[in-house]
Image: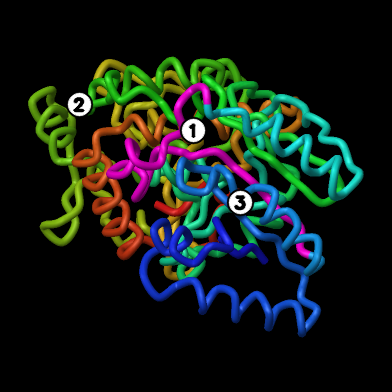
């Protein structure tokens, strides 16, 4: 458990945290201590409390709390109070202060942690509304990249599937971490989080998305040559602009309930009731050697594969199909971690209007389709 306590001076604390908050926090800390609950104090060092570091360390020691200091991150309320809260360059000697005081009061020394990405499944950042993230930087800077919401997301299944997931191969963490047995200090650096992607190269059109996928999933095609798995031949859903484009090019489109469009999967005199009983209706535009005859106008559903959207319980999730030969290669080779990172990067770049169009169509598709042999094998990537 972590409790924010920026100062033991009531007026300073409430200047940072708001009126009528100090007494509540101190009361709760006393209850935690009396009930012997493990707890750490969290303190953001600002211009207001820069001289309170030693007092906070002594309080933590007296009450057997660990203590975690960090420097100001300009997000949330700090965006509007940056000038008031930020330390001047000549005042920013936090590392020296903390090192001196823990030597004086704890007889401990700070060590520096390895410089690697700390995003993993061992510790997750949870927001008040239940959204959760790999780390606090992602939560603050790219909230769209939430993994899911604890109220709706199949958390236990995801955690079991991703129990070894980490991004330690990335080295762009914007923080340096110093630690001793009881004290942690997180210092800002000039690095930019690898999950905080530039918004100048947004994928604003469907064509942009398809081109990006062509590069992102470029290795997938070589695994398709000898693959016998038929799922990527089945029911291919279409966005509205794809339907219009395909019709202009003489490709048959099948409409269901005046709502959802698919590439037509019916042969000449076939009835739809006969075909929907088939788990893998053959795509009429895929040749025997696995090549696509409409490659230049290939639908997004095909371009995405083996990434897909599927209902897990009542929640629509982005998934990775495990029967695909490329997915199997990713797992066996250990490249799955890099793939998942690149997947998150891709999701964050999609224009939100197109993104929610995709989600809307896929929810409608899921409402009218059911695999006769049960769901495919997949791992969950994130909540849609």
Front: mark 3 or 2: 2
* 195 vs 326, nearest the viewer: 195
Q: Disc 1 versus disc 3: distance between alpha carbons?
A: 19 Å
Which numbered dot is residue 126? none
For the residue labelled by badge 2, is the local secondary structure a helix, a strand or a loop? loop
Classify 10 Å Cα crowding around label 2: few (below 14), some (14-19), many (20 and above).
few
Q: Earlier in the sequence, mark 1 or mark 3?
A: 1
For the residue labelled by badge 3, is the local secondary structure a helix, a strand or a loop? loop
Q: Disc 3 versus disc 2: distance between alpha carbons?
A: 31 Å
Residue to which mark 1 is pinned:
343
53 part of magenta stretch: no
Front: mark 1 or 3: 1
- Name which residue lies at 34% across and 50% down: 77
Image quadrant in which you'd find residue 383: bottom left
* 204 vs 108, nearest the viewer: 108
Can you say whether 309 is above or below 30 in the image? above
For the residue labelled by badge 1, is the local secondary structure a helix, a strand or a loop? helix
74 part of magenta stretch: yes
- 32 left or right, relative to 138: right
Classify 10 Å Cα crowding around label 1: few (below 14), some (14-19), many (20 and above).
some
User: Residue 41: x, y in percent?
Assistant: 66, 60
Q: Earlier in the sequence, mark 3 or mark 2?
A: 2
Q: Which residues are magenta?
A: 65-90
Residue to which mark 3 is pinned:
377
Asked whether disc 3 touches disc 2, contact meaning CB atoms under 8 Å apart, the reply is no
Asked whether disc 1 touches disc 2, contact meaning CB atoms under 8 Å apart, the reply is no
- 322 left or right, relative to 61: left
Residue to which mark 2 is pinned:
205
Can residue 280 be seen by looking at this rendering? Answer: no
Q: Disc 1 versus disc 2: distance between alpha carbons?
A: 18 Å
């Amino acid at each position: 458990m972590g409790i924010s306590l920026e100062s033991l001076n009531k007026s300073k604390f409430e200047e940072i945290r708001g009126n009528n908050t100090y007494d509540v926090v101190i009361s709760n800390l006393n209850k935690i201590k009396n009930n012997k609950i493990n707890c750490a104090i969290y303190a953001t060092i600002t211009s207001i409390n820069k001289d309170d570091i030693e007092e906070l360390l002594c309080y933590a020691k007296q009450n057997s709390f660990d203590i975690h200091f960090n420097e100001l991150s300009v997000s949330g309320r700090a965006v509007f109070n940056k000038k008031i809260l930020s330390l001047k360059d000549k005042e920013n000697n936090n590392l020296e202060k903390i090192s001196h005081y823990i030597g004086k009061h704890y007889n401990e020394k700070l060590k520096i942690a390895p410089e690697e990405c700390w995003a993993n499944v061992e510790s997750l950042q949870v927001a008040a509304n239940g959204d959760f993230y790999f780390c606090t930087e992602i939560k603050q800077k790219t909230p769209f990249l939430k993994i899911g919401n604890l109220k709706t997301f199949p958390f236990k299944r995801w955690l079991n599937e991703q129990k070894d997931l980490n991004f330690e191969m990335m080295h762009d963490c914007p923080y340096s971490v110093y630690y001793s047995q009881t004290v942690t200090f997180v210092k800002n650096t000039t690095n930019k989080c690898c999950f905080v992607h530039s918004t100048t190269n947004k994928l604003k059109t469907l064509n942009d998305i398809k081109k990006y996928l062509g590069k992102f999933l470029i290795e997938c095609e070589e695994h398709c040559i000898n693959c016998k798995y038929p799922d990527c031949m089945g029911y291919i859903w279409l966005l509205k602009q794809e339907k219009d484009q395909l019709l202009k090019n003489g490709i048959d489109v099948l409409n269901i309930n005046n709502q959802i469009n698919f590439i037509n999967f019916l042969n000449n005199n076939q009835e739809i009731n006969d075909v929907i009983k088939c788990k893998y209706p053959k795509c009429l535009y895929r040749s025997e050697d696995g090549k696509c005859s409409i490659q230049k106008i290939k639908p997004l559903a095909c371009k995405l594969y083996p990434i897909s959207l599927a209902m897990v319980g009542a929640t629509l999730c982005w998934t990775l199909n495990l029967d695909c030969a490329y997915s199997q290669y990713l797992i066996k080779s250990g490249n799955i971690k890099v793939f998942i990172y690149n997947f998150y990067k891709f999701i964050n770049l999609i224009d939100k209007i197109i993104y929610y169009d995709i989600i809307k169509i896929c929810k409608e598709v899921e409402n009218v389709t059911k695999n006769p042999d049960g769901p495919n094998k997949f791992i969950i990537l994130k909540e849609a």
